[in-house]
Image: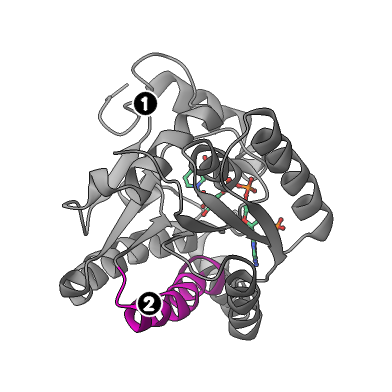
Amino acid sequence: MFDLTGHVALVTGGNSGIGLAFAKGLLKSGASVAIWGRNSSKNAIALAALQALVDEQSLPGGVAAFACDVTSKASIEAAFEDTLARFEKVDSCFANAGGSGESQMLHDTSDEDWNAVVNLNLNSVVHTYQPVIRHLMARKAPGKLVVTSSVAAMLGTGMRAAYSTTKAAVVGLTKALAVELGRAHIQVNAILPGFIETEMSMNTPQQFRDACKRRTVSGEIGTLEDMEGIAVFLASPASNYITGQSIVIDGGQSIYPM
Ligand SMILES: NC(=O)c1ccc[n+]([C@@H]2O[C@H](COP(=O)([O-])OP(=O)(O)OC[C@H]3O[C@@H](n4cnc5c(N)ncnc54)[C@H](OP(=O)(O)O)[C@@H]3O)[C@@H](O)[C@H]2O)c1
């Protein structure tokens, strides 16, 4: 049920953090994986690590990295063409690339800063999904669309209104698309991680990180390994009857009133 041999997954922001963890989990389950990222040296380092994993474990899937800035629709279209040229198809798409933007009060936020976060965390997901949906429909193939939202979509997070707003918006997008694409057998879900130590989250104040840790029910912060399984589950037939859902992976941070 979790064997993804023959499956092709696309992971945006797959060159580090949570996206790289998704890519590892998917490869370990037999899928081929295309990772997209802006930074070419990070792409090369991630690709070498993923290829080493494939070689060490004699995994059946292939892996490739493609340069893509997800805030540019043209860059997305080009990366998608490159991905199809390499793997011939895409079965699942993890729209994971994102960022938190500046830490600032809403009334001090310029339109430029606000729009940058909207472009990165919301418009990029729409622009990434569009060619994937067209491709799945042209093939009349089932598929899986997954966005990385955040517990910030549900909880109040001061100083990062654009982040919370965009992460909540993709939850709405997830429900709308789940309905729109249901008859085409394309499932659409959102993953809502709590605090996970990555390049992005290391920029948050120590006090905030300590508070997140205290709020996990085990007292431990989640690791990147904790992110691998959900990608496998949501790409696999095991999740075929799950759509429009927001799946929280936060060690209990959002249910523990510490
Ligand atoms: N870490 C957490 O605690 C946490 C919690 C909840 C949700 N999330 C979400 O998880 C996702 C991944 O973040 P992370 O924590 O794993 O941080 P990360 O390690 O900093 O990864 C961010 C990824 O996004 C890519 N990216 C950023 N801007 C991009 C752009 N314009 N075009 C293409 N790729 C871009 C980065 O690649 P380049 O550097 O090459 O651009 C990188 O691969 C984000 O959507 C984030 O909001 C994280």
Q: Camera-side residue: 87 or 117?
A: 87
Which residue type carries mark 2? Ile
The N terminus - image quarter: top left
Asked if residue 19 is positioned above or below residue 138 in the image, the reply reads above
The amino acid at mark 1 is Gly
- The residues colored magenta run 118-141
**Location of residue 25 with respect to 210 vertically, above or below:** below
Q: Earlier in the sequence, mark 1 or mark 2?
A: 2
Find disc 2 in the rendering and name its residue. Answer: 133
Magenta stretch: includes residue 117: no
Along the line of sight, the residue nearer the viewer: 207 or 249: 249
Please state which of the two labelled residues, at mark 1 or mark 2, is closer to the viewer.
2
Name the residue beneath numbered marker 1: 251
Task: Locate residue 141, reporting x and y percent.
Answer: 31, 71
The quarter holding residue 232 reads: top left
Which color mode does the image show?
Answer: one colour
What x and y, as percent, mark residue 205? 62, 36
Q: In which quarter of the image is residue 175?
A: bottom left
Would you call the spot at circle 2 few (<14 residues within 10 Å), some (14-19), or many (20 or more)? Answer: many
User: From what the image shows, is residue 52 above or below residue 142?
Assistant: above
- In the rendered image, residue 96, in percent from the top left (x then y), is placed at 51, 56
Residue at 57% across, 79% down = 111
Residue drawn where x is 34% and y is 38% of the image: 2
Prevailing secondary structure class for the magenta stretch in the rendered image: helix
Q: Is residue 159 visible?
A: yes
Indicate the position of residue 134 as horizontal and vertical percent values. Answer: 39, 83
